[in-house]
């Protein structure tokens, strides 16, 4: 790294190489605070949500389940069938808009619209898996009670209502055969469970679901303790507040809609990584790190996306918004090294989150049965060298130093398959 970039980053409290061991310890401490395992008046940043779910001991076989995936502004539905070998196939797929996007709906209208959306699947299964990616409390019987919707969804009467039970009542009124169960879960748990549904002949000691896309989150399987039953726990990892912040993080945080919240997510998820790169550039330009021409161009920037940042990392000489800022190769190298450091920190954060989840699970001690990490998200797979860096840091810390074995997998239709598995548990 150029000495001028190294010095600049250190002045702004941006670590050149985060110590994964110490960051993992901080995340673990925050997780245990949230679980009530630590006696302290300090509050956890992460919400450690209990799900009351475990992966099935054996993959589903010779069963069909209706799958609903409601997240953001899209509503997806399909039928998932598992054959005698446990292989899953998806049919009857449809996508439409999420109820409550276009206008405010009453409770009755909301569930009536959901029933309309899945009417074509009527009586094709007596079980439903429902991935409902909004803030909700999961009950012991597998239902979900939402406590908040994202701003796009307008259905205030649904808050505090058991989604599964209410949908069951609506379907019954429409003449559906008796629905035995509707299981509610979020996308992180779906990703985790897809590992159990996609590898019928492979033996794993445990599973982790990891989402690194626009947002960031993780789920793992907590072994039984005196305070918590053996079950999948959703960590809300992006809310961890026990990590050091650089000057760039502090500045960015003040500009967000929820200052002081989601501190870890703001340091590495797709929604924020480009903005971190922008704060780096603006600060460097103010300190005249680049050529005079580049400094002035950068000062006029008001936004930078991860797509634009990644495009430059993929090819610093291609025509792009960032490339046009550069007067010469010296500018290019300095910008490249700043962006590369931001991506590297993301890799170290991700590796630390996954390490904390793996250690907390108590699994992965035998290389024959590693921990299956199901990773999902365009940021994870598409960002320049990010996946390779995460795997490298994980291997060094988890396997070489702690003798914990893992395997990162990408499951086709992971959210759909995992939701189907949940619907059959």
Image (cartoon, rainbow, N blue to C red):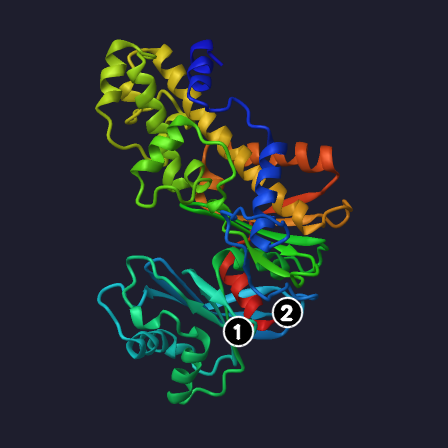
Instruction: Give the structural element (helix, strand or loop) at label 2.
Output: loop
Q: Earlier in the sequence, mark 1 or mark 2?
A: 2
Count the labels in the image.
2
In front: 197, or 298? Answer: 298
* Looking at the image, residue 83 lies above or below residue 38: below
- The alpha-carbon separation of the residues under discs 1 and 2 comes to 10 Å
Q: Position of residue 419 (x, y in %)?
A: 52, 65
Mark 1 is surrounded, within 10 Å at the Cα level, by few (under 14), some (14 to 19) or many (20 or more) other residues, namely many
Asked whether disc 1 touches disc 2, contact meaning CB atoms under 8 Å apart, the reply is: yes
Assign the C terminus to one quadrant of the image: bottom right
Q: Position of residue 148 (x, y in %)?
A: 36, 62
Residue 392 can be seen, yes or no: no
* Looking at the image, residue 316 lies above or below residue 424: above
- Residue in the picture at 36% in, 20% down: 317
Residue 340 can be seen, yes or no: yes
- Residue in the picture at 63% in, 64% down: 54
In front: 258, or 39? Answer: 39
Instruction: Give the structural element (helix, strand or loop) at label 1.
Output: strand
Q: Position of residue 382 (x, y in %)?
A: 45, 38
Give the residue number, with chain letter if any, for mark 1.
65
Give the residue number, with chain letter if any, for mark 2.
60
Q: State the image quarter where residue 252 is shown.
A: top left
Mark 2 is surrounded, within 10 Å at the Cα level, by few (under 14), some (14 to 19) or many (20 or more) other residues, namely many
Q: Position of residue 94 (x, y in %)?
A: 38, 67
Horizontal placement of 224 versus 337: left or right? right
On residue 309, the disc is none
* Looking at the image, residue 324 lies above or below residue 408: above
């Amino acid at each position: 790294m150029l000495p001028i970039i190294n010095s600049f980053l250190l002045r702004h409290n941006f670590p050149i190489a985060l110590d994964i061991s110490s960051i993992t310890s901080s995340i673990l401490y925050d997780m245990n605070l949230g679980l009530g395992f630590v006696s302290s008046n300090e509050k956890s940043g992460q919400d450690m949500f209990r799900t009351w779910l475990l992966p099935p001991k054996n993959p589903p076989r010779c069963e069909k389940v209706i799958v609903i995936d409601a997240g953001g502004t899209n509503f997806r539905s399909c039928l998932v069938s598992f054959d005698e070998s446990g292989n899953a196939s998806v049919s009857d797929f449809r996508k439409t808009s999420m109820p409550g996007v276009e206008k405010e709906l009453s409770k009755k209208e909301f569930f009536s619209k959901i029933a309309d959306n899945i009417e074509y699947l009527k009586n094709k299964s007596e079980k439903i898996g429902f991935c409902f990616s909004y803030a909700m409390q999961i009950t012991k019987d597998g239902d979900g009670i939402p406590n908040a919707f994202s701003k796009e969804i307008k259905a205030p009467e649904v808050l505090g209502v058991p989604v599964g039970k209410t949908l069951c009542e609506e379907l019954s009124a429409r003449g559906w055969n008796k629905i035995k169960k509707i299981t509610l879960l979020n996308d992180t748990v779906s990703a985790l469970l897809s590992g159990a549904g996609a590898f019928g002949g492979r033996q794993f000691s445990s599973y982790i679901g990891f989402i690194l896309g626009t947002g960031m989150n993780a789920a793992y399987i907590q072994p039984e303790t005196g305070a918590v039953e053996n079950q999948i726990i959703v960590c809300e990892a992006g809310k961890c507040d026990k990590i050091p912040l650089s000057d760039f993080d502090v500045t960015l945080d003040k500009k967000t809609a929820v200052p002081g919240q989601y501190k870890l997510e703001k340091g590495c998820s797709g929604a924020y990584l480009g903005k971190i790169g922008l704060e780096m550039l603006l600060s460097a330009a103010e300190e005249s790190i680049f050529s005079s021409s580049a400094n002035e161009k950068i000062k006029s920037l008001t936004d930078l996306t991860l797509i634009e940042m990644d495009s430059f990392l993929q090819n610093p000489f291609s025509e792009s918004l960032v490339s046009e800022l550069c007067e010469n190769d010296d500018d290019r190298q300095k910008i490249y090294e700043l962006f590369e450091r931001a991506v590297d920190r993301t890799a170290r954060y991700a590796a630390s989150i996954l390490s904390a989840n793996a250690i907390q699970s108590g699994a992965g001690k035998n290389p024959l049965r590693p921990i299956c990490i199901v990773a999902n998200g365009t940021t994870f797979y598409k960002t320049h060298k990010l996946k390779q860096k995460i795997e490298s840091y994980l291997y060094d810390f988890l396997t070489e130093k702690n003798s914990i074995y893992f395997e990162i997998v990408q499951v086709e239709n992971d959210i759909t398959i995992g939701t189907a598995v949940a619907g059959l548990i």
